[in-house]
Image (spheres, rainbow, N blue to C red):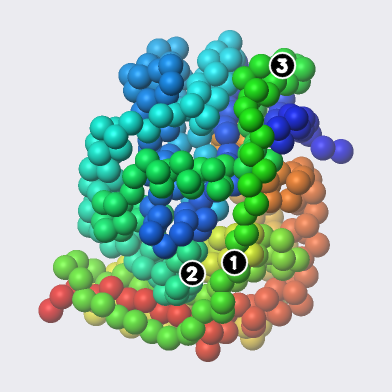
Amino acid sequence: MTDYTVHSLANGIRILFKHAPSTITHCCFVVNAGSRDEDDHETGLAHFIEHLLFKETEKRSTSQILNRLELVGADLNAYTAKEYTCIHASLLNQHLERAVDLFEDILFHSTFPAEEIEKERGVILDEIASYLDQPEEAIQDDFEELLFKGHPMGRNILGTTETVANLNAEDIRTFMGRNYNTSQMVFAVFGNYRFDKVVHLAEKYFGKVPANSAAKTRCQPCASIPGSSTFEKPISQTHCIIGTQAYAASDANRHGLLLLNNYLGGMGMSSRLNLEVREKHGIAYTVESNYTPFTDTGIFSVYFGTDAEKAPKATRLIYKELKKLREQKFGVLQLHQAKQKFLGQIALAEENRMGLIISMAKSLLDFDHVDTLQQLFDKINAVTAEQLLEISNEIFDMDKMLTLVFEPKQ
């Protein structure tokens, strides 16, 4: 039995609702359009649009947009990812209509005036410069560019200084016309309402939005080319990422890799990498692994930052832990403990209600359904030690790995 309700408007926009006995509402509007949907000359455009949505509309100035929710103590924000754009707000229950009204206005009636485009261009160029000053962030983007070489998935979401400098209002309208498909939009609400009230508000504001059924085709990335690249940077520590392409969000092995990733280098101080590299040998403040699934591919990676002379040992220790997972099957107690830790973390993450409702909206876009917490638990509990060994040998194969290193300039 599901613990959420869905209603589809005539124009294709879907309304997702989850009840919560709280005085606070969390809501979001998710569009299935991100940086991977950009053409070559549009790099950074999806993120640029997200910024400009908060500027001017046909009936509101920038200050009116920003004050619409902040005047009642609400939190309004947005972000862009590789496959989607999300606007979200947290507010007192009685102000939900303000949020629905504002979301509809900025998403479908923004005017993108030239002076605002120029101002925001400067802001984003400064954001790019700031990101380049953070090697732990920059190395992730550079790694993905190597991993998905020549494919839109490898592009920096912010764009480059060259592409951002040339984006204009015509580019914006063309991109939105091509990618802001109403059947690929979800408005989601987590709050204390009757569902019919949420549907009424959605029909009142989003129901009049003209349907956009523009077709969109996404090209699946080619397999990555393994290898190692090292670059000297004006930094004080060595930063390293080791990784490969991994399972897509729809792959049956996804839950097994999520479990393995959490055991290896996920949240908490008791992950294998943290215990071995940081606690036992004291050679890296930050060492972690990550698995991010997308609709047709995924990324598995291990990252660490440490002093240059300690980096070779840290790398050997990471290789050693990956080798163990390829060669040694989980024991009964070891597998049980790994599952209990992961399930507990998932349950605690549901307390982040904004994160939960955004995740549910994305799941509805990608799969047309949302797993309940129990369904997710069942899938993780069904993972066997044999499956984990097979996954480890497929994903943690060092012959398939790509390594990127940033070293301090000598």
Residue 237: name its quadrant. Answer: bottom left
Residue 287 visible in the picture = no
The residue closer to the viewer here, 267 or 279, is: 267
Residue 356: name its quadrant. Answer: top right
Identify the residue under disc 3.
Answer: 200
- The crowding category of the residue bearing disc 3, from other C-alpha atoms within 10 Å (few below 14, some 14 to 19, many at least 20), is few
Residue 305 vs 176, above or below: the answer is below
* Residue 398 position in % (x across, y down): 52, 86
What amino acid does circle 3 point to? His
* Residue 188 position in % (x across, y down): 64, 31
What amino acid does circle 2 point to? His
- Rounded to the nearest whole Å, what is the CA distance between mark 2 and mark 1? 8 Å
**Which label sits in the foreground, 3 or 1?**
1
Residue 111 vs 407, above or below: the answer is above
Identify the residue under disc 1.
Answer: 219
Q: Residue at x 32, y 76 (%)?
A: 405
